[in-house]
Image (tube, coloured by chain):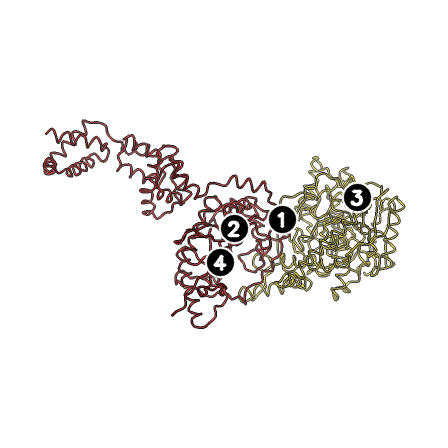
Amino acid sequence: MSDILKYTAAELGKKIRERKVSVKEAVDAVMERIRTVEPKINSYVTVDEDGAYAQAEEIQKKIDTGEFTGPLAGVPVAVKDNLCIRGGLTTCGSKILSGFKPTYTAEAVCKIQKAGAVIIGKTNMDEFAMGSTTETSFYGPTKNPHNTEHVPGGSSGGSCAAVAAQECYCALGSDTGGSIRQPSSFCGVVGMKPTYGTVSRYGLVAYGSSLDQIGPIAKDVTDCAAILETIASHDPKDSTSVDRGSYSFTEALRDDVKGLKIGIPRDYIGDGLDEEVRRAVMQAARVLEERGAEVETFDLGLVKYAIPAYYTIASAEASSNLERFDGVKYGYRADGYDGLHNMYKKTRSEGFGEEVKRRIMLGSFVLSSGYYDAYYLKALRTKALIKQEFDRAFQKYDVILGPAAPTTAPRLGSSLSDPIKMYLGDIYTISVNLAGLPGISVPVGRDGKGLPVGMQLIGNVFQEETLLRAAYTYECATGKQYEAPAAGLGKGE
Amino acid sequence: MAKQYETVIGLEVHIELATKTKIFCGCSTEFGGAPNTHTCPVCTGMPGSLPVLNRQVVEYALAIGLATNCKITQVCKFDRKNYFYPDNPQNYQISQLYLPIARDGFVEIDTPSGKKKIRIHEMHMEEDAGKLVHDEWDDTSLVDYNRSGVPLVEIVSEPDMRSADEVIAYLEKLRMIVQYLGASDCKLQEGSMRADVNLSVREAGTDSLGTRTEMKNLNSFKAITHAIEGERARQIELLEAGKDVVQETRRWDDNKEHSYAMRSKEDAQDYRYFPEPDLVPIVISDEWIAQVKARQPELRTEKLERYKKEFDIPQYDAEIITESKRMADIFEAAAAICKKPKKVSNWLMVETMRLMKEYGTEADRLSFSPENLAKLIDLVDDGSISGSVAKKVFEQVFLHDADPEKYVEEHGLKVENDEAALEETVRKVLSDNPKAVEDYRGGKEKALGALMGQTMRAMKGKANPATVNRMLRELLKSE
């Protein structure tokens, strides 16, 4: 049975279509794995065992009758807990959504359901996706499967850890400032943030609406492409969703980067970058160069302005998006309040965690009258200028290469005490969201402690195919980098 | 000598648009309905739901903007207005601040000293909030989101009005324009048109503006008039006493005819407006504007002129008829069918107005079809029914949109052309009223009227008055 767990999603899907493995067997394997490792990892907020078996039966029938023929049919998938699924608990890692069960399903989840994936459960996350460690969850921190004394990264830490620990075959995450790419890097899996507008945000509980994108987290680039192809759609329910015309992410998987122009921003490999991470990423760049890509370093402007611009815009939007959590309609309501105002105050004081409150206050401040121009408007202008910097870079390069994070996964408990330092950790991922670009994180090795290192490839808007091709070529050249942690889950037990 | 004061008034008018569905979701906008039955995840602010703009809202707003001589903002967008209140499910309202759809317009009103332009500062689109229901018995508040997400436009005027009369004239003008466009029914009582009054006073002859107050909860023209008069007096009294007017929002209590301070400028909320990230900017092309312009129905002023020319009806009649789009529509359609515009006009001016008064209804609510009015006119004209019967039949048309032909048939109201039967009745009337007969023969022409009346009554109105008249004269002469 443990053999089944080693498959990628595509491999498992193939075995299921060939009737070599049943959907139930796949779910059995995952459930057993969850029972074994979940107490140590805490990837999930909710594991829907009954639901998974019910789905398995239905899906098996539809595979048998030939209704489901796609690569994800029968494959157990995990979904980040900020994506709504009709009738299922959706917590966003927050107390304030206690007991909240939406009456609708996120469009991206509908897409994987229609492709025949089995949804195993909802994964843990930083509260409302605010954090880089998955430690701000009301449901306790998730731990890095490669070393449980370390964080998995965040905010999609639960999804990335679940994939890495073989508690599912692939997962959906969301990425507002690096929340897919950074934990993918920390957990040694492949994670992609698509171009803004590629995947419908309908049913994704918003954090920073103009930056949020849903994306795939997988064991390899092939799975990543298959999931992206499944979830990408032009959805009339999301006005910011884009009609991309024709595309094929799976056909983009070619082992060929000849003539591909790759630029490495000097600011991405300079001060503040961990030496071991730098070495692994530069080695990966060399691999692509050997395969025929033209690699050079260049100056990408305004890198240092990305973090303040991001935290201004994302917090502003978040402060407004989170206003609806007030105890009136659903979720948590404080006891023993005195009147409406006090009910709001007590509910929100008790329902939100520290990091969420910090960003609500920050966001409310930058939008308040008298400060709007100086902060919010200035951040919007900075965002536009950063986009221009990328536009200029993409006149010259097809792909921008760098690390996904300045370090490997930090130890549990070492980040939250210094939020500014934690925010600075987002330096390489954040501008991609500000500019609405696609980015992918691919595992490229490990540091001395055995913790995974991720390389980030950034493309111009709608150039996911180029990114997938470069990532796939790297994978072909080096063999798959994804490696499940040993049954004992590495150190820290 | 006492100082002379001038009142300076600007209005913020909210109008509910007549779309079938809400501004950002597919829920019905129908008034009423059991609480929370016209709702979905979007208009109840569920997490993860997203707004999608209803194109018809932009279309109506565009039509109103063009009809009020505004400049259209061809790339406009929505902003979020943040404030906590349970009737507002997201705790922010999607509105427009930075780039409203229309700006810098005006409408013209009639004042005793001639025409006057009231400038429009801007008009923006936004969503309505839900409704709170307070249960005093349980000491709880319940919320109904049926109205949440109903589309509104807010029209903000410049402080160009100087009296309650001008305010009412401006509101009537706006209402007429919007009704003619079919963009809203504009009913103050039902809240589909709401006006907040910004008012300040200053010494006559000065240019600078005084401190203003904003008055809310004005549900009728009467309330608006009283509130303006009351607030003017209150502010003057303060100034005369050497006190300052405080910039504040006041709530009008129509029962007590008095206003109360709701919140002062110091407690004014900071709405933290910022661009709505869930919606993309609306691009209004020249073509779109041209299309809306082309579809623009004839407005009242043009209609009035045309009626006078085309139908040759008096100015006064044309004014009354065009005051309501509904009545004008009935007039034109009925006139087109029976080809007797003057008669149609008479029925509208006399009987319709009388019945409207009797049943306490408004011209906008007239529910009879022009076909049935036209039929009625034809029945009178071809002598099938008498004038008095016609009035009775019309009441049925007015109330139930009855088909006059059927009604006359079913109730046996048709004029009887059986001259023998009529002659018998006339003879009986003459023998029963010797005094009147004598009077007539003695030269009192008026006595004929009494005999006419008696005969018509005896015939239950089913006689052709002309025939009765002729027969009476003949018989009175012969005997």
Q: Is residue B432 visible?
A: no
Q: In the rendered view, does B36 fall on the left or right side of A209?
A: left
Disc 2/disc 1 C-alpha distance (Å): 22 Å
Q: Total marks drawn?
A: 4
| Residue at the extreme bottom | B242
Q: Label 1: which residue?
A: B281
Q: Nearer the viewer, residue B206 or A94?
A: B206
Residue B459 position, x and y percent, is 21, 34
Residue A467 position, x and y percent, is 79, 46
Mark toward the start of the polypeptide (4 vs 2): 2
Q: The yellow chain is which one?
A: A
Disc 4/disc 2 C-alpha distance (Å): 13 Å
Disc 1/disc 4 C-alpha distance (Å): 30 Å
The amino acid pointed to by label 2 is: Gly
| Residue at the extreme front | B205
The amino acid pointed to by label 1 is: Pro
Q: Label 4: which residue?
A: B159
Q: Label 3: which residue?
A: A466
Q: Which of marks 1 and 3 is in front?
A: 1
Q: Nearer the viewer, mark 2 or mark 3?
A: 2
Q: Label 2: which residue?
A: B105
